[in-house]
Structures are given as C-alpha cells and as structure tokens.
Amino acid sequence: MEQLLNQAPLLAILVSALAAIAIPLTGERNRNLRETWTILASLLKFGLVASMVPAVLAGDRPEVSLLEIAPGIELALRVDPAGLLFAMSASFLWILTSFYAIGYMRGGNERKQSRFFSMLAVCLSATIGICFSGNLLTFVLFYEILSVATYPLVIHAGSEKAYRIGRQYLVYAITAGISLVAGIALIYGLTGTLDFTPGGFLDAGIGAPLLWTIFALFAIGFGVKAGVMPLQSWLPNAMIAPTPVSALLHAVAVVKAGVFGFVRLVGYVFGPGLFGDMGAATVLAVFAGATVVLASLIAMTKDDLKARLAYSTVGHLSYIVLGVALLVPTAMLGAAFHMVTHAAMKITLFFCAGAIYIHTGKKKVSQLDGIGKQMPITMAAFGVGAVGLAGVPLVGGFVSKWYLAAGSVDADMLIFLGILLVSGLLNAAYLVPIVTRAFFRTSDEHPRFGEASILMVGPIFVTMLLSLLLGIHPDGIFGFFSIAEAIVESVTGVSFSGGG
C-alpha cells in the first residue's frame, strides 16, 4: 500500500502526459475519441491526487526519486500539504475546463483542436510536476516545461498579433527561467542541497549580499508568472488566446505556478524567520501591495471583458504574495486558501466571458446591456464570481480575504489592511457594474432567451457552486481548508484549531 502511495504522484503526472500523446495520434478523424482521452485523463488525474489527501493530512509524505544526476542532485517528487493544495485545485478544475473547452472549441469551430487539447494536457502534467517537486531542480524543470507548452496555446489564433504576443511571452518566460537556473546554481554552490524543507534551509551565515542576490533572482523568476508589477505586461496581452487557455493561465496553472513559487521560496527555502530578518519580506510586501491597487485601477479602465479580468488576476495574485510576505500564520493561511478561492471565482468569470463570446460574439463590457435576460444562468454565475472577488460574505473570497486582513493586523501592518479594503471596493467598482448592466439595462441586441451549450454552461454552474461552497463551508469541499492549515503548521509550527 505504501509503495502504491509513493507511486501516486508520478502516475498523476504521467496520466495527462499519455493523453497528450494519444490526442494527436487520434487526430481530427475521431474527435469524440480524442475528447474522451482528455476527459478520462482529467478524471484519473484528480482521482490520483485526491487519493493522497488522507495520508498527507495524517503526516505521510509520498515520495519517489526519478533520476539521480549527481550526488545530492536528483529529480524527485514529494507530496506535502503545499503541493497537495495546488494539485487538488488544478486537477479538479481541469475536469471542468476539459468539458468547457470541448464546448468552446466546437462552438467556435476552432482550428488545430488536436494540438490545443494535447498542449493543454502537457500543461497540466507540468503543473502537477510543479506541485509535487521535492526540490528546486525538479521544480524549475517542470516550471520550464509549463512555459514552453503554453506557447502554442497563446499563439493558437495563428495571426500576426498572436505570434507577436507569443514572442513577448517567450522573452518573459525565458528570462524568468534563466534567473531561476542562476538562483538554484548559487544555492547549491553555497549549501550543497536543493531539497524543500519546511521552515527553510538557508541561514544567515551565507551573508546578506548573497542572500539578497538569491532573493532577487527568484523574485524575477517567480514574479513574471505571478504577474507582480512591473513584470506583468505579458499576462493581459496573452488574452488573445482562446478562453479555455485564459482560464488555464489565470486560474488553474500558469500564474498559480508563480505564486506557488513564492510559497516555496519563503516557506521552504528561506524560511519565514530569515526572510523577515533580512528585510526581504518588507520589499516583497510593498511590491505586492502596490500591484494590488494599481492593477485594480487599470482594470477599471478596460472595456474589453477579458482584459478587465486579466488585470483583476494581476491584482489577486498579489493578494497571495502579500499574505506570504506578511509572514504571520493568519496571513499565510489566507494566502494559501486564496489560491483555491481565487481559482474557483476567476475561472467562473472567464468561463462566462467565453460563453458570451461564443454565443453572441460580444467581447466588450459596453456591449453587454440586457444580456442577463438572454443568458441568466451565465450572468448569475458571473455575479457570484464578481461579489466573491470583492470579498462579500457567503462566497469563498470573503474567507480568504478575512484571514489576509486579520494577518495584516497580526503583523501590525495596518497599511496593508487599508490596501485590502480599498482593493475590495475597487473590485466591486469594476466587476459589479457588469452584472447590473446585464440585468438592469435593456438592449434590442439581446431579445431572446438562450444560453451557450450545456458543455459550457454546466462547468460554469459547477464553478459557481464551488465558489459558494468555499464561502459557506470552507472545509466541506475536498478538505481544502484543512490542507491550507496543514501548510501553515508545517512552515510556522502554529496549529489552527478546527477546520474552518
């Protein structure tokens, strides 16, 4: 049984990698079989990840060594609460994204669908690899695979603009990768190890100049994917990709890999004590706080719906970075749980945007007057996601923001409490008017009731329900809150009583 448990993280990576091979082999000849591989792989992946939850919460750490490159340098997988939280969220939402993507690609008669689904599967394999990496080398390997596999999805439209944006994405991704490789080489040279260790493995004896160099290299490497300003410009531009890719980028995998990198950096490489003592926490918190506010202000100016949601993502990713940088247990708990709640709420909003586009051809906020009468389920779900991101009770975003706010008080950093409150108001200002416009204005352009296909509306309804359940009973869905608590306990030694 123990041997099977230790193989589960590797199998969770391989299942979608095998699907990525089967999908192009099936090709365009039999799209039903091709899409069956996608759905089957997503279900198996989630089942494998979920099977590890009881053992990990009980203290077990499934692990497997893939390849020893040199003494002390190996590719290894190890499942801990931090990786499990990310993997549970990503693998469950991939199931819904798979169904949604089928409806989207069929409804829009998109080209190169086999390549699309194959690369989507590679991205999810790489994401689970990032989740379960036992050390920095394995992490960076899967991190770069994710960067490369995302490129064909970004350029899917095949236009000159898409290729130009794809080149910009690659420049950012390659720069981030080089920075990370330099960082891990420096760490290995100084310590002789790259293994993630709860509470960190670096120490002050390395010296401030080298510690700050390591921090700068990793801040660039992770900051690009996390969209921390001024490294965020690729992210809104990547909205040229199909909406399922936008959902992948902004809710499930790519950007979450960046913020997850900061979780690993602070909690498992530096350690909260050293990170705070050297002053890096303050620097990171300032950049994150500024990003939260500036991204929200920019979002208010965008009429393109996906662009508005993209800048919303930039801001909300920095909620997570800010929570980690505050270093106190309550803020870290809020940051960890916000990885899940933001994923559920933001994927709901992107799913809604895609359904509107496929069904009506509308992309602009200014074009959505009265659309709530035509697409009431879609716009009701959008409303739930919108108020959740603003922090309204009974939706998941309220719970994670509550702990982030409490953490700001615990850390005696009331300026960040003010930033969180202002940001909540700004979130409401750029999202709620979309809902009121849809339901309380009229337009002759949306005269009849009609939703997108059930393959799209079904996932929208489920992610909306998940957003609500995470707010009403945070630990009632897959034990997300308990896993987040376990992360904080492993890093800080502080145990939270109860389970949300």
Image: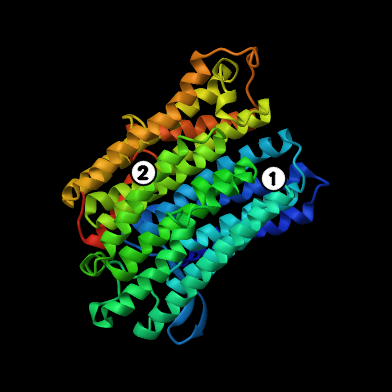
Residue at 57 percent across and 35 percent down: it is: 304
Picture quadrant of residue 343: top left
Numbered disc total: 2
Q: Nearer the viewer, mark 1 or mark 2?
A: 2
Viewer-side residue, 17 vs 336: 336
Position of residue 448 relative to residue 396, above or below, is above
Q: How is the image coloured?
A: rainbow
Q: Is residue 499 visible?
A: no
Q: Is residue 354 visible?
A: yes
Residue 428 numbered tag: none
Horizontal and vertical percent position of residue 381: 49, 27
Question: What amino acid is found at the position of numbered circle 2 in the picture?
Answer: Val
Q: Which residue is mark 1?
A: 36
Position of residue 75 relative to residue 176, above or below, is below
Q: Residues within 10 Å of mark 1 (few under 14, many from 20)?
A: some
Horizontal and vertical percent position of residue 311: 47, 43
Image-based side of 292 in relation to 309, left or right:
left
Q: Which residue is mark 2?
A: 293
Alpha-carbon distance for marks 1 and 2? 43 Å
Horizontal and vertical percent position of residue 421: 28, 37
Position of residue 456 relative to residue 146, above or below, is above
Image-based side of 56 in relation to 278, left or right:
right
Residue at 58 percent across and 42 percent down: it is: 97
Picture quadrant of residue 106: top right
Viewer-side residue, 424 vs 302: 302
Viewer-side residue, 372 vs 87: 372
Residue at 40 percent across and 29 percent down: it is: 429
Image-based side of 31 in relation to 203, left or right:
right
Report the quarter where the C terminus lies: top left
Q: Secondary structure at mark 1?
A: helix
Report the quarter where the N terminus lies: bottom left
Question: What amino acid is found at the position of numbered circle 1 in the picture?
Answer: Thr
